[in-house]
Image (cartoon, rainbow, N blue to C red):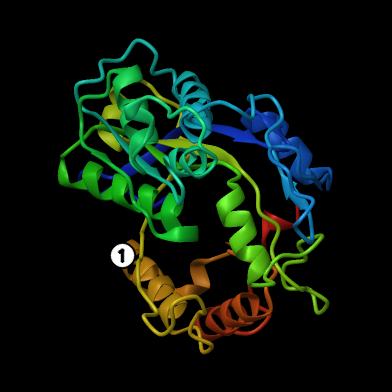
């Protein structure tokens, strides 16, 4: 039986994707279910001094675009708005919550290379979110969560909060990042990268970096109902927590992940038995995957719920 919508419930009415597997949600999904991979030798910058030299790149956006992350986000947002049939809806109470790790990092790359500097609006980490709001005319709240790998997911949680609190009726929420030489070289020096990502595999050795954007339309349920929108999902609950144990390594016992899972279930008013599937972080690194497995077993019981990570693509 569908759960009743509480006052100011948050639902999802549209989505958009720009990915190395293909731009557009259908192309992305088709690539996933077909088992295709977009991992290939890096072409965006010289990588001869890196080992391994593989990554997943978006090929249909110029490598010299001064704001690739912003361009990815604009494309994904355009698809999401069209999917939600919001093109003619006013933007006065539409917000933007766009997570990113790198944002305007291209500025620093150009500065180090003594190249011409990009326009000022492309500089800060929050540049993609501001560009999105300005271009689309969004007049609601705008924020840029920066929580490394959790940035995009936290942006969706933030959007749900805005909708529930009445701060916005519609929020474009998700994440965007571009393949940055600085970060690729950093993970390479840490020996945390691999030729191929193998999440939860016994032979996993490390992660493979990539780029792209994914944005969903988070909308207040009543607002969506009044305009006859098609509901893709309901954001029943969200949960956030921090390990605060090490600068780069997760809590080996999965403490933060466990607390976040339990908080999300509590927010939704559900028990672990109600969960049928988990889409995991699954980086393919030895410590992260082991930590996630511990947390999932704690909350759901070992082997009860199917778990998957799409990072193998």
Task: Tell me the residue at 45%/37% (across/down).
Answer: 216
Quadrant hosting residue 57: top right
Residue nearest the observer in this picture, 80 or 264: 80
| Residue found at the very far top of the displayed protein | 88
Q: Is residue 43 left or right of residue 84?
A: right
Task: Tell me the residue at 40%/24% (across/down).
Answer: 229
Residue 304 position (above or below residue 182): below
Residue 311 position (above or below residue 10): below
**In x, y percent, where is residue 2?**
43, 49
Q: Is residue 62 left or right of residue 258?
A: right
**In x, y percent, where is residue 103?**
43, 42
Residue nearest the observer in this picture, 188 or 59: 188
Task: Tell me the residue at 66%/28% (across/down).
Answer: 23
Quadrant hosting residue 185: bottom right
| Element type at mark 1 | helix
Q: Quickly name the residue at label 1.
A: 267
| Residue found at the very far left of the displayed protein | 166
Quadrant hosting residue 222: top left
């Amino acid at each position: 039986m569908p759960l009743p919508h509480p006052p100011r419930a948050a639902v999802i009415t549209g989505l958009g994707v720009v990915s190395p597997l293909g731009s557009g949600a259908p192309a992305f999904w088709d690539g996933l279910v077909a088992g295709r991979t977009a991992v290939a030798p890096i072409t965006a910058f010289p990588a001869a001094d890196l080992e391994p030299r593989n990554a997943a790149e978006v090929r249909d956006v110029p490598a010299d675009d001064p704001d690739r992350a912003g361009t990815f986000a604009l494309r994904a947002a355009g698809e999401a708005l069209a999917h939600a049939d919001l093109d003619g809806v006013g933007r006065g109470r539409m917000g933007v919550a766009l997570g990113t790790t790198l944002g305007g990092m291209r500025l620093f790359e150009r500065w180090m290379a003594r190249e011409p500097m990009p326009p000022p609006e492309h500089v800060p980490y929050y540049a993609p979110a501001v560009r999105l709001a300005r271009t689309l005319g969004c007049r609601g709240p705008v924020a840029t969560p920066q929580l490394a790998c959790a940035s995009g997911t936290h942006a969706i949680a933030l959007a749900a909060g805005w909708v529930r609190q009445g701060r916005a009726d519609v929020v474009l929420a998700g994440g965007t990042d571009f393949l940055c030489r600085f970060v690729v070289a950093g993970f390479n020096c840490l020996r945390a990268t691999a030729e191929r990502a193998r999440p939860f595999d016994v032979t996993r050795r490390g992660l493979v970096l990539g780029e792209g954007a994914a944005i969903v339309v988070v909308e207040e349920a009543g607002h969506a109902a009044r305009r006859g929108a098609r509901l893709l999902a309901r954001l029943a609950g969200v949960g956030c927590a921090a390990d605060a144990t090490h600068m780069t390594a997760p809590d080996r016992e999965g403490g933060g992940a466990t607390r976040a899972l339990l908080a999300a279930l509590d927010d939704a008013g559900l028990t672990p038995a109600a969960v049928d599937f988990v889409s995991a972080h699954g980086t393919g690194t030895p410590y992260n995957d082991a930590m996630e497995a511990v947390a999932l077993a704690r909350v759901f019981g070992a082997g009860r719920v199917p778990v998957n990570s799409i990072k193998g693509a």
